[in-house]
Structure formats: C-alpha cells, structure tokens
C-alpha cells in the first residue's frame, strides 16, 4: 500500500510525455517572465498588508517602522525557496510547478497533497485579491466627481453575506458591534428580496474575475502583453508614491523604530509574506517558455529582487510620512492614508488607481497559474481527462481556465477577505517546504542529472528554506492552521475516491505488473 502511495514519476518520462503530446504554445521570454513575477507579487500585499504589519492585531504585535527589516527577513526566506524553484523549473520545464516536482521526488500522494494545497495559493488567494480589487474599485469610482455627479454602487451589489453577518462580540466591543449591526441593517434594507431572502453579493469582484478569465482563454501571450501594461503602470504608481512621499518624510516618525522588538519584527514578516506570494507562479508557465533552462531562473529570482527593493523603499517612505499608530485609521489602505495625512488627497486618489491596477495584475497571473496545476493533474490521471484538454485554436487549457474562473467568481461574490489571506499564507508556505524537501531528495538520489541552474551552497539553501517557512508558519494564527488541516483532509478523500484508481501510474502498473 505504501509503495502505491509513494510511487514516483521518472523525470525523463515526465519530459518525454510533455514532448510527445500536443503541447502548450511556447511564447514567453525572460522579460515576460520577470513581468509575470512582478505582476503576481506586487498587489494586495504592498497596498494593504503593510498597515497590519506595522500596527499588529489581536493575534500578533506590530513591527512599527522596523517593518523595513521585516521585508528583508521575508525576502531572505523567500529567496531560499526561489533558488529551489529556479533549479526545479530549469531542470523540469513542465507545467505544474511544485506539483510536478513533488511527483518526481516525493511520490504520488505527496504530489496530490501539494496539488490540492496549491489550490489554496492560487484559487483561494485569488478570491481574496478579487474582493480587495472590488473594494478599491468602489473607492476609485465613487471618488470620481464630475460636475457634482459621482457613481454610487448600491451596497447590496458590493458586499457579501459573510461580512455583514459576521458581527463583533458585543461583550468585547459594544461600539464596534453597534456599528457593524447598523451597517448590516443598512445593506439588507437596500437589497431586493426574493422569497423573503435578501440578495447581497459582490458584483465588482465577479466582474473582474470573469473579464480576466476571458483574456486567459484567448492566449498566454496576449495575457502576458496585458500583464506587462499593468505592471508598468503600477510600478509608475509606486514610484509616484515614493517620490511624492519622500518630501514629507520626518525622521522623528521612525522613533521608536521597533516598538515590540524582534517579536514584532518577526510577526510583521509573517504578515508581509502575503506581499511576496506570487514569484512561484512563474514556474507554472515553464512549458510555455521559449528557453526555460535560461529564462526560468531569471524570471523567478529577478522578479523577487526587484519587488524587494520597491517594498523596502515604500516601507521607509510610508513610516516616515506618518506615525505608524495613525495607520489604524485605515489599515486596509495605508499608502492612501499616509498621503491624506499630509493633505495630498489627489495623490491618494492616484494611488487608489494604482491599487486597482496592481490587484488586476495579481488576478491575471494567479488565474493563469491555477488552471495549469489542474491541467498537469488531469494529464496524470489524478483528475478527470477533461482537465487536460487544450483549446484547438488558442492552445490554452481552456476547460480548467473557465472552471477556475467560475469557482473564484462564485466564491468571491459571497466571501470575506480576512480568513482567505491567512489560509493562503499557510498553504503557500507548506508548498514551499515541499519544494525545498524535493531538491534535497533529488540531490541525493540523482546527483548526476543535468542542472542548467543549481542553487548554490549544496543542501544548505533548501534546509534554510524549510526552516524559514516553519518560522513564518509559527507566527500565523492557529485558526488558519486548523482550516488548512481540514482542507488537506478533504483533498485526501478526493484522492482515495478518484485519483488513486485513475492515476496513469496505477494504470501502467496494472498493464505491466512486471515493472
């Protein structure tokens, strides 16, 4: 039984299968990959989570201005894993990312777990990003005033059941409870009713997911061009914030630098990790890259380093512009709050526009990555064959792209963002750990395999990657750990009911029992 669960696919067979089948269109170069990485990384994290990282919350202390150091710590932790991803992606340029790597090194059951886990990073993470996009979009649209007229989106079309029914505990904060209750009643009273049931959903979130899905079905090159435009735009917006904000920096705001010491800095790093999620999404398009052996390491590591420089500078300017305690007045939109604090309202509106663009780019790349995980799992028989179908004209995995779009759109219509973020963090960190473990195993079992790119310093890099991820998991709320365990349990049920029986490796074993 254990032998069946941990059966592995030979790397040479994986590469041969991909070459023999009608493959995905190879259309991406190193520049495209770097932009895809930046598009995935710079998004909700830098535009939203820096406020929580500086302030802290009920579960963890804040880093204060020392979140600049938190960014460095998180970057180092991610860099160890990025080097491992780059080695794998150059050596195995196949769609599927960590799922494919785990299948070749850790066995089928682990590959299934990581594939199921990656749904959390890409699909569940995209639900959070879609909801965040909708919030910024609402602010942006309603902030536009033309001759006294502005667009107002009805409350019942830009909220969700989860948020309005999740009221604070009145025994702990009566004022917060009354505010939330009043808002709930306001939303429900304005909503149309069908059979006595109020209709409340997040229409902007649904709209953006449907639009992104349509673009991705047409083609990966077209998607890359669209992403490049958004990446350039949001880089300009961040540069705008840095340049304008630099004139309002007061060194006195950096004191105290680390109000909660090293514990606050590390807790800030665990929050900030959400701002780094995305660089691994580059590996999911390895099969659509012209020269993956050269371009994949450039795309993964290059995008990570560029984003880190932006993050540190933005954190320095932000905490220099405003006392970090003041971010409590709008932790969800810290950059805009810092500008408004200095009476730069027009600049704040420009940054809100940048947040919409940034989240659109993240949605694009994550919606690009998830279908390719499903595509690889379908090709291996762990999911039904329909998951591995390729569009005859566009050469894209259109079935899984549409299924992912429908699932993300439906979930984002009725869900809240809070639980999604922590669940995404732990799911991604778990995937990172397995990638690092896979590198160690392959170094030991197949040391002579050609490695166009090799992570330096032997197995020290993957070991440090594992330890760094475990450290960041330690600072996540226990509730996210419990949800993650439940999610994996559901995945194992699906595997044993379908995947284990229909796996291509299982069918090959039945056809050739002597092997």
Image (cartoon, rainbow, N blue to C red):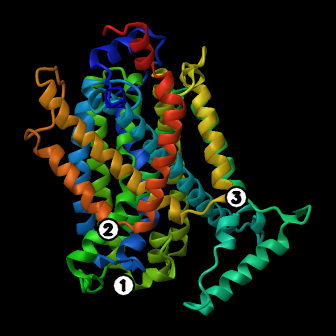
* Disc 1 versus disc 2: nearer the observer: 2
* Disc 2 versus disc 3: nearer the observer: 2
> Element type at marker 1?
loop
* Residue 475: assigned label: 2
Left/right placement of residue 338 relative to residue 458 reads: right
Residue identified by numbered label 1: 323
Question: In this orientation, which residue lies closer to the viewer: 477 or 390?
Answer: 477
Q: Is residue 241 above or below residue 299?
A: below
> Element type at marker 3?
loop
Q: CA distance from mark 3 to mark 1?
A: 34 Å
* Disc 3 versus disc 1: nearer the observer: 3
Q: Which image quarter holds the C terminus? A: top left
Residue identified by numbered label 3: 202
Mark 1 burial class by Cα count in 10 Å: few <14, some 14-19, many 20+: some
Identify the mark nearer the N-term, 3 or 1: 3
Q: Is residue 361 above or below residue 350?
A: above
Query: What residue is rendered at 89% in x and 64% in y?
Result: 193
Query: What residue is rendered at 67% in x and 62% in y?
Result: 141
Q: Are marks 3 and 1 in contact (CB under 8 Å)?
A: no
Q: Which image quarter holds the N terminus? A: top left
Identify the mark nearer the N-term, 2 or 3: 3
Percent x, y for residue 284? 40, 33
Question: In this orientation, which residue lies closer to the viewer: 452 or 403?
Answer: 403
Q: Quadrant of residue 117?
A: top left
Percent x, y for residue 154? 78, 66
């Amino acid at each position: 039984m254990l032998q069946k669960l941990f059966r592995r696919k030979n790397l040479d067979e994986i590469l041969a299968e991909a070459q023999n089948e009608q493959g995905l269109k190879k259309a991406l170069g190193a520049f495209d990959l770097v932009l895809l990485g930046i598009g995935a990384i710079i998004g909700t994290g830098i535009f939203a989570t820096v406020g929580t990282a500086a302030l802290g919350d009920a579960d963890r202390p804040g880093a204060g201005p020392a979140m600049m150091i938190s960014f460095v710590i998180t970057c180092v932790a991610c860099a160890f894993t990025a080097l491992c991803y780059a080695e794998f992606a150059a050596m195995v340029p196949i769609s599927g990312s960590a799922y494919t790597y785990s299948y070749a090194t850790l066995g089928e059951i682990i590959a299934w777990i990581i594939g199921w886990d990656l749904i959390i990073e890409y699909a569940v993470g995209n639900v959070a990003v879609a909801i965040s996009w909708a919030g910024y979009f609402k602010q942006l649209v309603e902030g536009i005033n033309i001759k006294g007229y502005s667009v107002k989106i009805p409350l019942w079309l830009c909220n969700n059941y989860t948020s309005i029914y999740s009221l604070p505990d009145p025994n702990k904060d009566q004022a917060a409870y009354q505010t939330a209750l009043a808002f709930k009643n306001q939303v429900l009273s304005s909503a149309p009713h069908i059979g006595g049931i109020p209709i409340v959903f997040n229409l902007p979130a649904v709209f953006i997911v449907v639009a992104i899905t349509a673009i991705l079905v047409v083609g990966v090159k077209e998607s890359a061009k669209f992403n490049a435009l958004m990446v350039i735009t949001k880089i300009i917006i961040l540069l705008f914030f840095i340049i304008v904000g630099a004139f309002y920096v007061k060194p006195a705001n950096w004191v105290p630098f680390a109000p909660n010491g090293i514990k606050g800095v590390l807790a800030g790093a665990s929050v900030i990790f959400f701002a780094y999620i995305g660089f691994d999404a580059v590996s999911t398009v390895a099969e659509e890259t012209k020269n993956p052996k050269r371009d994949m390491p450039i795309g993964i590591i290059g995008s990570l380093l560029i984003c880190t420089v932006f993050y540190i500078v933005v954190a320095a300017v932000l905490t220099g512009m405003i006392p970090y305690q003041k971010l409590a007045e709008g932790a969800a939109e810290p950059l805009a709050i810092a500008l408004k604090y200095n009476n730069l309202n027009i600049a704040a509106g420009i940054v809100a526009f940048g947040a919409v663009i940034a989240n659109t780019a993240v949605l694009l790349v994550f919606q690009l990555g998830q279908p390719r995980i499903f595509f690889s799992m379908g090709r291996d028989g762990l999911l039904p064959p329909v998951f591995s179908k390729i569009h005859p004209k566009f050469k894209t995995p259109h079935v899984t792209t549409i299924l992912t779009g429908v699932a993300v759109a439906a979930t984002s219509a009725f869900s809240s963002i809070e639980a999604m973020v922590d669940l995404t963090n732990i799911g991604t960190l778990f995937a990172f750990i397995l990638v690092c473990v896979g590198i160690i195993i392959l170094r030991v079992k197949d040391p002579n395999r050609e490695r166009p790119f090799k992570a330096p310093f032997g197995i020290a890099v993957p070991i440090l990657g594992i330890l760094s991820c475990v450290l960041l998991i330690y600072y996540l709320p226990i509730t996210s750990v419990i949800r993650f365990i439940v999610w994996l349990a559901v995945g194992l049920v699906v595997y044993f009911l379908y995947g284990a029986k229909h796996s291509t490796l299982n069918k090959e074993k039945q056809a050739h029992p002597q092997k």
